[in-house]
Amino acid sequence: MARPEVLDRIQDAEREADEILDEAKREREERIAEAREEAEEIREEAREEADELEEQRFEEARAEIEAEREEILAAGEGERERLEAEARERSDETVEYVVERFVEKVHA
């Protein structure tokens, strides 16, 4: 094979190698870009799931607090009714006591 022919084949092989390297670099960059996009999608999904979970837990806590509040109010209402009834009973006793004392003072 003639020397110029060998040089041409070497140059062709070097160009082909450069093209292969360039293609490999482009593919690598594409894969990196795709991986970054996928990672961002995964992060966004995780953020959304975390937000949903936070909202769910917040609503559960709110419902629990509301139920506890209703229990406290119901217990307070029962206690209020008991105290009012007790006060009414004592009111009658107090009136009788005052009337008795008045009558005693008047007849004394």
Image (cartoon, rainbow, N blue to C red):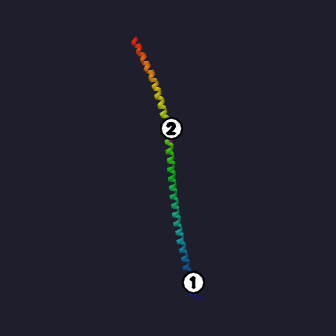
**x, y percentage for residue 57?**
51, 48
**x, y percentage for residue 26?**
52, 72
Taking the spot 51% from the left edge, 61% from the top edge, the residue there is 41
**x, y percentage for residue 90?**
46, 23
Q: Quadrant of the C terminus?
A: top left
Taking the spot 54% from the left edge, 68% from the top edge, the residue there is 31
Q: Main secondary structure of the magenta part?
A: helix
Name the image quarter holding residue 6: bottom right
Report the disc number at residue 9: 1
**x, y percentage for residue 104?**
42, 13
Say which element carries label 1.
Answer: helix
Circle 2 residue: 71
Q: Distance of mark 2 from mark 1, alpha carbons?
A: 92 Å
Few, some or many C-alpha atoms within 10 Å of disc 1 (few <14, some 14-19, many ≥20)?
Answer: few
Query: Do callouts 2 and 1 mark residues in contact (Cβ within 8 Å)?
Result: no
Taking the spot 44% from the left edge, 19% from the top edge, the residue there is 96
Say which element carries label 2.
Answer: helix
Magenta span covers which residues? 67-74
**39 in relation to 25, above or below:** above
For the residue marked with disc 2, what is the amino acid? Glu
Report the disc number at residue 101: none
